[in-house]
Image (spheres, helix red, strand yellow):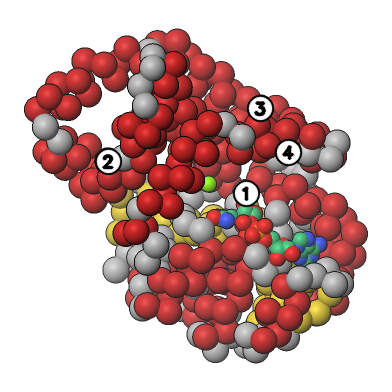
Amino acid sequence: MAGNIFGTAVYYDADCNLNALKGKKITVLGYGSQGHAHALNLKDNGMDVTVGLREGSKSWQAAQAAGLPVKTTADAVKGADVVMVLIPDELQAETYEKDIAPNLKQGVYLAFAHGFNIHYKKIVPPADANIFMVAPKGPGHLVRRTFTEGSGVPSLVAVEQDPAGDTMEVAKAWAAGIGAGRAGILETTYRQETETDLFGEQAVLCGGVCALMQAGFETLVEAGYNPVNAYFEAIHEMKLIVDLIYEGGFQTMRNSISNTAEYGDYVTGPKIITDDTKAAMKNILADVQSGAFADEFLADYKGGFKKLYAEREKAANHECEKVGAELRGLMSWLKK
Ligand code: NAD
Ligand code: MG
């Protein structure tokens, strides 16, 4: 049943009513990571789901083969009661202007899985539209797989505009419909979801952690150690540590490591993550809050993603990736 942790409302299946969606004409735009999972899970829950895609999209066949009706983006929006936008964040604003906005029906429920475009006002929907978010805290393939296994991925829900007065009920029904009510549906706001998501992926999860692992690898290799040892110690073993933290927090992890490792953890961590690092994190957060990061990202997209593609290529050619690829080739247990 519904609960509350640290001021956040948490809902489960028993707190959600799928009837808030049943009978409504539902459109899912995009059939990628999130799109296929939302569309299929809702369909399996008896919902009337249509997928909207670009003409000639590679996903068109896949969605049809899964038994979903497919239309062009504009046609799929026409007449739909609920439209969930699951296309890449950088494409949403132009797609909204061209194909979504001109076809939205009065009083539509318009939804997103990430707050980016609404929060930074790259999309400004009409006042009669009901705006909600269902943001699964995991990739789409996991949203689909856990659903078919009888569980789900915890998800955030938020409501930004509510002229109809029942938008949170619709959002909770959507979240439960994709399986999140089995795991936990946490209520948040567009601002909170967007800013914490961007900060987390940049400062910690993706940017911070990858840069830390790569610097550790480089330090060992530059000091003359074998790249294989360096890869194991600085990169590969990260998963083992993270799995323990995921299971039981830092204490469970520290219970499992040696006293030597635990002692080193306490005395060395603060030498790596210093006051300067915290100051850098605060600057990163300020750029997320001001929208400067969002604008920089969209400017790179508009210029053909020069920065994104150059960085992607540079990262792919780093020595650590070559060492890792060879090592994984030797690890029979990784090839299920
Ligand atoms: P994706 O790149 O996996 O898939 C995007 C899909 O959109 C593709 O099927 C593409 O063909 C389609 N598409 C592109 N332009 C289109 C158009 N004009 N009309 C219709 N379809 C179009 O994207 P994703 O990772 O599923 O991300 C979708 C949204 O979900 C984003 O807002 C993202 O922030 C959010 N999200 C993603 C994850 C994740 O783990 N991938 C997690 C939570 C939230
Ligand atoms: Mg994220």
- Are the residues tagged 1 and 3 within 8 Å (C-beta)? no
Q: Position of residue 82 (x, y in %)?
A: 68, 73
Q: Residues within 10 Å of mark 2 (few under 14, many from 20)?
A: some
Q: Position of residue 14 (x, y in %)?
A: 35, 76
Q: Check disc 1 and report the residue beneath it.
A: 115
Ligand 1 closer than 8 Å to the CB at disc 4? no
Three-letter amino acid code of the residue under disc 1: Gly
Q: Which circle's residue, 1 or 3, is located before the other in the chain?
A: 1
| Residue pictured at 45% horizontal, 10% vertical | 276
Quarter of the picture holding the N terminus: bottom left
Determine which of the numbered discs, if any, sits on residue 241 in the image. Answer: 2
Which quadrant of the structure image shows residue 285?
top right
Q: Which circle's residue, 4 or 2, is located before the other in the chain?
A: 2
Q: In this view, does 64 lie to the left or right of 96?
A: left
**Depth check, front residue: 306 or 63:** 306
Q: Is mark 4 on a helix, strand or loop?
A: helix
Three-letter amino acid code of the residue under disc 4: Tyr
**Depth check, front residue: 305 or 92:** 305
Three-letter amino acid code of the residue under disc 2: Ile
Quarter of the picture holding the C terminus: bottom left
Q: Of discs 1 and 2, which sits in the foreground?
A: 2
Q: Check disc 3 and report the residue beneath it.
A: 290
| Residue pictured at 83% horizontal, 64% vertical | 100
Q: Which circle's residue, 4 or 1, is located before the other in the chain?
A: 1
Q: Which circle's residue, 3 or 2, is located before the other in the chain?
A: 2
Q: Check disc 4 and report the residue beneath it.
A: 309
- Are the residues tagged 1 and 2 within 8 Å (C-beta)? no
Q: Of discs 4 and 1, which sits in the foreground?
A: 4
